[in-house]
Structures are given as C-alpha cells and as structure tokens.
Image (spheres, helix red, strand yellow):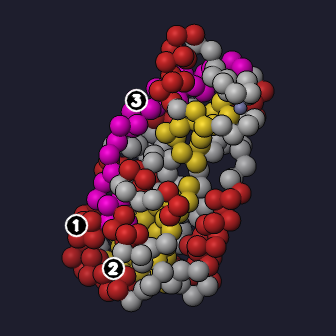
Amino acid sequence: MILTHVEEARTALRDLIEQSSRIVAFTGAGISTECGVPDFRSKDSPWLRYKPIEFDLFMSDVLMREEAWRRKFALDDIYLHAQPGRGHYALANLVASEKMPAIITQNIDNLHQASGVPAEHIIELHGNGTYATCLTCGLRHELDVLRRDFEATGAAPECRECGGPVKSATVSFGQAMPEAAMRRAHAAAIDCDLFLAIGSSLVVYPAASFPMLARQHQARLVILNGEPTPLDSEADLILRGDIGDILLPFAA
Ligand SMILES: [Zn+2]
C-alpha cells in the first residue's frame, strides 16, 4: 500500500509502531536534507566539485591525501554545522521509549548523535565525517586541530602518536565496509519486528540488503521516502512524501 497523504501516512505509521516492540530504523540522506546536508548522490551533489578520492589513491600518494583533505574541509563548510531535523528527533524519541534498539544509518553527518541518541544505539555503515582516525593505530583525531595545522602547512595530517596517515572517519570508495558495524546491523535487522527505511534510495549495496534481511525474518517493512525505491514491491507500507512532515508528530 502506498500512502501519499500526510495525515493518512502518520496514522498508519502510528498504528504499526504501536503494534511493534523492536523497531529498527535505517536512514539515508533524505532524513538530513531538511537540515542542510546535501544528498551526495543527487544530481547537483557537491561531490561534482569535490570528487571523493578512492581509498587506494589516498593510501598510496601523499599528494592525493593532501587533495582529499582540501576537499574534505571545503565540504565541511557546507554541512558540518547542520542541526538535527524532525526525523532525527522522532527517532530519538523512539529510542528513548525503548522501542527502538538500533538506528542503522548510511549518513556520516553525526545528526542522530546530535539529536540525543546514545552512540551505542547508532550503527554507522559509512563511518562518521565529524572526526578522523589514524589508519595505522586507530587513534581518534579532532577535525579542528587537523584543520588548523593543515591550513598552516598544507601537509596531509599524520598521527601524533605513530606518524601514520590520518583520514576522515568515513568509509571511502574502495575501502572495506566496517566489519563490526555490518555485524551489528545484521543482528539488528534479523531481530526486529518492524523495519523503518527512511530517506534512503535503497540502491547502495551491501547496505540496502538490510531491509530484505529483516523482511526474510518476518519483520514488517515500511519505506518512507520522497521517491520510489527498488524495494517498494517488498514493503508492507510505503509512505511517499516529506520525511520531516510525516515524522513531525513523533518528534514532539
Ligand atoms: Zn596512529
């Protein structure tokens, strides 16, 4: 069933949430667009100007590392000060009510954390763009410190402990998916009774396999998105419309 009327969508979603006890959310770019975070897969993506650098190049070439950081800081100016939106607060309420053990996200914008969801309930499939890590020893580095040094020297950051290359804590193209996050997402998907896919085009694999996994384990599947997705035919309910509008009553 496809609902496009906002009140009907809210009522149907409320009913399903009331009938469920273990709800997993799966979020993509669409939940953050109202917060000013661009959808990097859209046709006017800032990636066209600041093309992501593949992981192998980042590792093998110091000049590419410098270029990657130049683009990273330019992109940060576009979205790093974004604040959570209605969708984030709706999910934060569901987590606080103990109905939602996990939010699986494709986003790197840290807005689920910023909306008050404790980190242990958030599974980041593509990492987090608001800090950096050493690729050798794993030490966390803060962006403001790295940026100050980068702007002073132009040199790609190196780890203050081990001298290894430091990269934004996101998963780059060509970089392996994070094993622990994939394992946690798998466990959450097979153990829920309602799977809410929100603002994801559900085309990026392997991430988009989680809705089907939940479905195969008897969860109900709701897809809330502005556009059709390839998994619509598998969904119990499709809510087509503005994500923030539909989730607004749950955010209060
Ligand atoms: Zn290190």
Residue for point 38% across, 50% down: 114
Residue 104 x %, y %: 53, 63
Q: What element carries label 3?
A: helix
Residue range in magenta is 62-91
Q: Which of marks 2 and 3 is nearer the N terminus?
A: 2
Residue 217 x %, y %: 61, 85
Residue that sits furthest to the top in the current view: 153
Picture quadrant of residue 203: bottom right
Mark 3: few/some/many CA within 10 Å (<14, 14-19, 20+): few
Picture quadrant of residue 226: bottom left
Measure the C-alpha gap from mark 1 to mark 2. Answer: 15 Å
Residue for point 72% across, 20% down: 62
User: Dot 1 corresponds to which residue?
Assistant: 252
Measure the C-alpha gap from mark 3 to mark 1. Answer: 30 Å
Residue 228 visible in the shown view: no
Residue 44 x %, y %: 42, 39
User: Dot 3 corresponds to which residue?
Assistant: 77
User: Dot 2 corresponds to which residue?
Assistant: 13
Residue for point 22% across, 67% down: 252
Q: Nearer the viewer, mark 3 or mark 1?
A: 1
Q: Is mark 2 on a helix, strand or loop?
A: helix
